[in-house]
Image (cartoon, grey):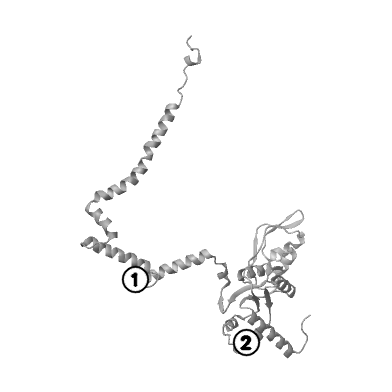
Amino acid sequence: MGFKGTKAEKKAVYDKKLCGLLEEYSKALICVADNVGSTQLQQIRKGLRPDSVVLMGKNTMMKRTIRTFSEKNGNSDVLNLMPLLVGNVGLIFTKGDLKEVREEVAKYKVGAPARVGLVAPIDVVIPPGNTGLDPSQTSFFQVLNIPTKINKGTVEIIAPVELVKQGDKVGSSEAALLAKLGIRPFSYGLIVRMVYDEGSVFNPAVLDLTEDDLIEKFAAGLSTVAALSLAVGYPTLAAAPHYFVNSYKNVLAVALATDYSFPQADSFKEYLKDPSKFAVAVTPATAAGSAATPAAAAEEEPEKKAEPEEESDDDMGFSLFD
């Protein structure tokens, strides 16, 4: 049972609970709780224990408590939660992995009927098939421009029909038809809107990034920094390997054009003096590849010779002309 007391006492208890959570936890999920019932919310609480705690409440109370907690403890990071407390939202404080907690929350969704005036979160499409309704209900389908036919004494929908589009309000006729067909088109649960992690606030889509995605993005950023650094002539650590390679090329070019030399340049000078040495260095690799061809041909020759010739009629011990 909930705490029974005056409004002031309830506020004091709530403030104490939220302050304790802010002090104990550094990570939280900000969730939208539209159309989530109390029974469903209780199931979510049980499923997330013991590493996570779900806290609902009025936005004004949560904002006031967060502001007071920040002033008392000098923790300005929690103030980043305040702009997120808009609409019917709740907080899930956790010590576990944020991605795993979000996946656990997503499991607790329940089907719900289409009520009149409700904004459709998805497109509602009625599939073709037998409805099980008697022919007297045909006029009901005609009002909604749904093509039907009578099959074996029941109404059958001929083609799929988009009854309600996403973002539109459900009308009384649409709600009544879905109820007659026993269709519960919507499902509701806590939807993670934003993620709070030690003062940082970010979109939950970030939780889906893998290590490979991070490495790829880091490499792309590193390449951009290096290219910009080389273009403007501003030295950075990202461009350092390119500077070393370009400097080596410049020194090598000077050595080849003058009498100055160093061990790494000697081999290049030898090739320039006698290009045949370069040809000799390349020939062994080419010869190794081409040597395989005669060898393979030589192996094929015995196989061809080993093939037995077609036997003549004489070899069989008789002649067709005897």
- Ranked by sequence position, the earlier of labels 2 and 1 is 2
The answer for how far apart the CA atoms under marks 2 and 1 are is 49 Å
Q: How many marks?
A: 2
In the displayed image of the protein, which residue is found farthest to the top? 322
Which mark, residue 45? Answer: none
Quadrant of the image for the N terminus? bottom right
Q: Amino acid at mark 2?
A: Phe
205 or 13, which lies in front? 13
237 or 132, which lies in front? 237
Find residue 123 and report its horizontal and vertical position in percent.
Answer: 63, 66
Identify the residue position indicated by label 2 in the image: 69
Find residue 117 and report its horizontal and vertical position in percent.
Answer: 68, 74
Q: Amino acid at mark 1?
A: Ala
Q: Which residue occupies 69% across, 86% down?
A: 16
Identify the residue position indicated by label 1 in the image: 231
Find residue 305 and report its horizontal and vertical position in percent.
Answer: 42, 27
Which corner quadrant of the image does residue 18 belong to?
A: bottom right
Q: Which residue occupies 42% across, 29% down?
A: 302
Label 1: how many Cα within 10 Å (few below 14, some 14–19, many 20+): few
Find residue 20 and report its horizontal and vertical position in percent.
Answer: 67, 83
Q: Which residue occupies 34% across, 73% down?
A: 232
- On screen, residue 208 versus residue 150, left or right, reads left
Which corner quadrant of the image does residue 124 belong to?
A: bottom right
Secondary structure beneath label 1: helix
- On screen, residue 144 versus residue 291, left or right, reads right
Which corner quadrant of the image does residue 177 belong to?
A: bottom right
Secondary structure beneath label 2: helix
Q: Compared to 295, does 102 lie above or below?
A: below
Mark 2 or 1, closer to the camera: 2
